[in-house]
Amino acid sequence: MSRTLDLTATPADRISRLRSVWRAAWDQGHVDALDDLLSPAYVRRRGPASAAQGRDQFKESIRAMRDAFPDLHTEIEDIVEDGDRVAIRWRTTGRHTGAFLGVPPTGKPVEVSGATFARFDGASVTEEWVTFDSRQLLEALGIITTGHQAAVDADLVRGVHRKFITGVTVVTTDDDGTPRGLAVNAFSSISLDPPMVLVCVQRSSSTHPVLHRASHLGISILSAGQLDVAKVFASKGDDKFARVGWTPGDFGSPLIDGSCAQLEVEIGERLEAGSHTVFTGRVVSARHDDLAPLVYSGGGFFDISHTAPLPW
Ligand SMILES: Cc1cc2nc3c(=O)[nH]c(=O)nc-3n(C[C@H](O)[C@H](O)[C@H](O)COP(=O)(O)O)c2cc1C
């Protein structure tokens, strides 16, 4: 099709081309068919948490999707036009028979629905905004559960958690020059290569919204002599940092003086889970020393240096 013809394409031409290119790319894997629809400067956006994709990256993501779901099928359920903009409501189904997002094949059928808002410049799409419920996909693959029915009594679960011994951390961030933070024992290593960790923060915490807009967070593992610091950060108040010594880390996160280990983390995913948000991220700075850590168990605090090591 010549460029002159493209530019005079009627809205009906655009829609029928969009349908056939989607079918070729998504259902048949002919991703180069997208070159007939998407301009070379095409940008695909998926909200602030995801990086924008260019045309080649988009093609690559369709290939990866089709490797994991070879029978992928997308049904266009509705198309609405408004001048140079087109809104498409779609539903995609497929069976998970190849690895996806690190999840080995489950054989499960997956269904995801969403909407794409495309902006045409002449005959080509220059920009798309895509929105879909990624929880449908993650839940189908068993990565998250969103079922709301409590299967087990809450007190029973609380009793189980009291049997699990943890340290105590102070999770901090810099909010435009103001240090903010709270005590957190829901801290875990995720991976050593690359070095990644997670912390879980309740949505009702006043630090929570600040962590949502931050790029980095600090984690200070409290030492056995810092019970008073744990109490400060387990409370609410604007003056927490006036009551303890702290020093900004290499990436600006406030780190608690006298803590036995410290990390700074570049925040990656923010996963909503029940009453909490799980913040994952890559470790960008780390240090530790010989001080013993403060221990939290069964609702009480302990000094680990009074415990006897078991031979094994
Ligand atoms: C030992 C201990 C561990 C805690 N762990 C967590 C945790 O993992 N996540 C969390 O959101 N709150 C945790 N809290 C509670 C918060 O520290 C507490 O609600 C704090 O007042 C929140 O402060 P903010 O509202 O100023 O952010 C913990 C408290 C204590 C004493």
Image (cartoon, rainbow, N blue to C red):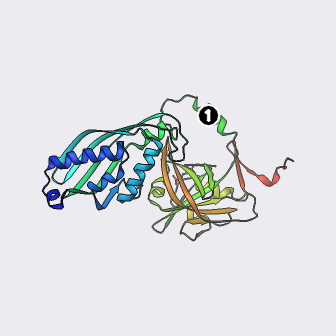
Q: Amino acid at mark 1?
A: Val
Camera sees residue 51 = yes
Q: Position of residue 138 (x, y in %)?
A: 47, 41
Q: Is residue 33 above or below residue 289?
A: above
Q: Position of residue 241 (x, y in %)?
A: 56, 64
Judge by depth and name the residue closer to the eye, 22 or 262.
Answer: 22
Instruction: Give the image quarter of residue 115.
Output: top left
Q: Position of residue 302 (x, y in %)?
A: 74, 50
Judge by depth and name the residue closer to the eye, 218 or 176.
Answer: 218
Camera sees residue 115 = no
In the picture, measured across the screen, residue 168 lies left or right of residue 119, that is right
Residue drawn at point x = 68 percent, y = 62 percent: 261
Question: SS at mark 1?
Answer: helix
In the picture, measured across the screen, residue 43 lies left or right of residue 239, that is left
Density class for disc 1 (Cα within 10 Å; few <14, some 14-19, many ≥20) is few
Residue drawn at point x = 67 percent, y = 39 percent: 162
In the picture, measured across the screen, residue 294 lies left or right of residue 72, that is right
Residue drawn at point x = 19 percent, y = 56 percent: 1
Judge by depth and name the residue closer to the eye, 219 or 94.
Answer: 94
Residue drawn at point x = 18 percent, y = 47 percent: 81
Q: Position of residue 233 (x, y in %)?
A: 59, 56
Farthest residue to the front: give it: 1
Disc 1: which residue: 157
Judge by depth and name the residue closer to the eye, 126 or 177.
Answer: 126
